[in-house]
Amino acid sequence: MDNNSKNYEDAIMKKAWDTFAKEGRSMFGLLKKVVGEGKSNLVSLDLKFFNLDYLYELEDGTFEHFEFQSTNNNTADLQRFAAYDAVLTQQTGKEVYTYVIYSAGIKNPTTQFKNGFNTYQIKALTLANINGDQKSKELFDKVKRGDKLTDEDALNTMFLPLTGGNRSVRDKILDSVKLAKYFNQENAINLEAMAYAMAIKFLKESDLDTIKEAIKMTTLGKMLIEDGRAEGKIEGKIEAAISLLDILNDQTIAERFGLDLEQVKTLRQNHTDKK
């Protein structure tokens, strides 16, 4: 897997978590109450900048630090996380517990390293250890019973293609598309956009065609199949393109949505300015 693919997969996981961050912790059985989000940009005394993926301050006065990884670089990544935690503890005087969420391609990641007398350890949360087949069944069973799907269910739906199990990535993406319609419109569009992004990146063209067929009748699909360039018809494409700015590069968005590259660059700039 090249660096672009790794970064892309990291971006997908971060986007999924960012959309349903509050519910994400309970997905892994972390039940302590969050009282606030910690400052995730740290500056050390030698002016090095540390960017943590997510940082939560808990009710017991400790921090939970989350990172997302699609690679297992042995101790290299752990040394980086240890540096983050050391600076955070030095600046706040509080304990830090670091969790690293690994995508399905990584089943047995390195979780600790020794440095002199000290041992640094993280808690690995591997999506490979989540049975996507069983999770998909549970979600469809809830739909059949008429139970209301929660934001935690939406996060599980988003992560389905990156989980373990025996079924193919294509089938799990199809499940995500089928489940999306049972959520409110905002969540449905996010789920459809994520499923479409994963399909573009991870599937062969023949399998991608299957996803395109499935997504045609979704809210996002109706945006994607608009072929006109008239003002009234381009609006849907622009909305769909904006939903994928954090995941796809400008050239890919332009090609997939039939937009001019300069138009996509303008969309990205406007999107960045609003953050």
Image (spheres, grey):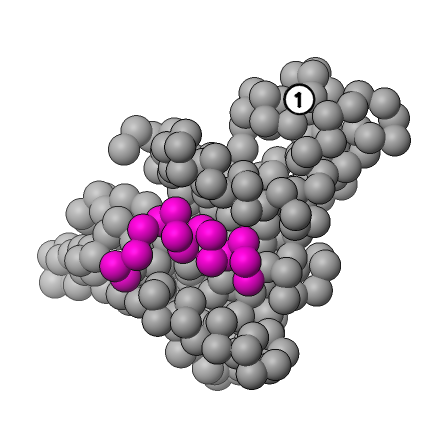
Residue 265 part of the magenta segment: no
Residue 212 or 199: which is nearer the viewer? 212
Residue 109 or 207: which is nearer the viewer? 207
Displayed quadrant of residue 274:
top right
Majority secondary structure of magenta residues: helix
Placement of the C terminus among the 4 image quadrants: top right
Residue at the image position 49 percent from the left and 71 percent from the top: 140
Locate residue 188 relative to residue 209 in the image: left or right.
Answer: right
Which residue lies under the disc numbered 1? 258
Residue 149 coordinates in the image, percent (x, y): 59, 74
Residue 180 or 24: which is nearer the viewer? 180
- Residue 18 seen in the figure: no
User: Which secondary structure, mark 1?
Assistant: loop
Q: Which residues are magenta?
A: 165-179
Residue at the image position 71 percent from the left and 57 percent from the top: 186
Residue 264 coordinates in the image, percent (x, y): 68, 24
How many labels, in total? 1
Residue 82 coordinates in the image, percent (x, y): 30, 55
Residue at the image position 59 percent from the left and 50 percent from the top: 192
Locate residue 101 relative to residue 176 in the image: left or right.
Answer: left
Q: Which residue type carries mark 1?
A: Gly
